[in-house]
Amino acid sequence: ALMFIGWITTVSIGVIVARFFKPVWPNTLLFGEEIWFQIHRSLMIVTILLTSIAFVLPFIYRGGWNKQAGFHPYFGSTVMALALFQPLMAAFRPPPQAPRRQIFSWLHWSAGTTARILAVVTIFLGM
C-alpha cells in the first residue's frame, strides 16, 4: 500500500505539477522558491520516504532477502536506487542557464520515468 500511494499518487501529482504548473505559477514564491518546485520537491520527498519504509519492511518481516519472490525484489531494489539517485542528482543540479543543465534535465527525466514505469511493474508483480 505504501508503494502504491507513493508511486501512483504522490509521484503522479508531482510530475503533473512540474510539467503543467511551472508556466502557470512562474513568479509565485513559497519560502523563496517557485511554488510549483516546492510542491514537486515535497511530493517527491514523501515518495522517497514511503518507498524507503516499504523497502525496509519486507527485510524486517522476512528476516532478509526472499529468493522465492521472483523479479519483485530485484525490480524493487532498482526502483529504490533510482529514487535515491534523483535527489542526489538534484543536489548537483546546474543553474538554469548553464550548458550542462540540458544533460541534467535529460537524466532527471530519464531516471524518473524509468523509476515510475518499473515501480508500477514491481507493484503488480508483488500483488
Image: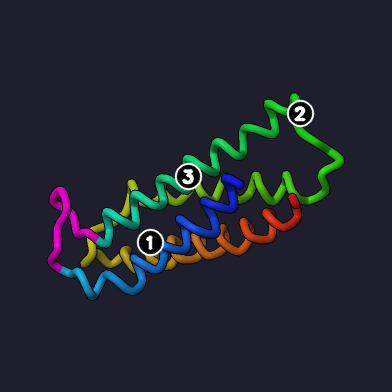
On the rendered structure, is 3 left or right of 32? right
Estimate how packed mark 2 is, as few (under 14), some (14 to 19) or many (20 or more) residues with alpha carbons within 10 Å.
few
CA gap, disc 1 to disc 3? 20 Å
**Residue for badge 1:** 104
Residue 48, label in figure = 3
- Which of the two labelled residues, at mark 3 and mark 2, occupies the earlier sequence position? 3
Q: Relative to 89, is 117 above or below?
A: below
**Hey, what amino acid is under mark 1?**
Phe
Per the image, label 2 sits on a secondary structure element best described as helix
Residue 68 in which image quadrant: top right
Asked whether 28 falls inside the magenta stretch, the response is yes
**Hey, what amino acid is under mark 3?**
Ile
Q: Relative to 92, is 102 above or below?
A: below
Q: Which residues are magenta?
A: 27-35
Residues under numbered marks 3 and 2 in contact, where contact means CB atoms less than 8 Å apart: no
Q: Nearer the viewer, mark 1 or mark 3?
A: 3
- Residue at x-position 42% and y-position 62%: 13
CA gap, disc 2 to disc 1? 38 Å
Residue 50 vs residue 101, the one in the foreground: 50
- Which of the two labelled residues, at mark 1 and mark 3, occupies the earlier sequence position? 3
**Location of residue 62 in the rendering, given as x and y in whole percent from the top left corner:** 76, 28
Q: Nearer the viewer, mark 2 or mark 1?
A: 2
CA gap, disc 3 to disc 2? 22 Å
- Which of the two labelled residues, at mark 2 and mark 1, occupies the earlier sequence position? 2
**Residue for badge 2:** 62
**Location of residue 72 in the rendering, given as x and y in whole percent from the top left corner:** 74, 49
**Location of residue 49 in the rendering, given as x and y in whole percent from the top left corner:** 47, 40
- Residue at x-position 53% and y-position 52%: 5
Q: Relative to 20, is 42 above or below?
A: above
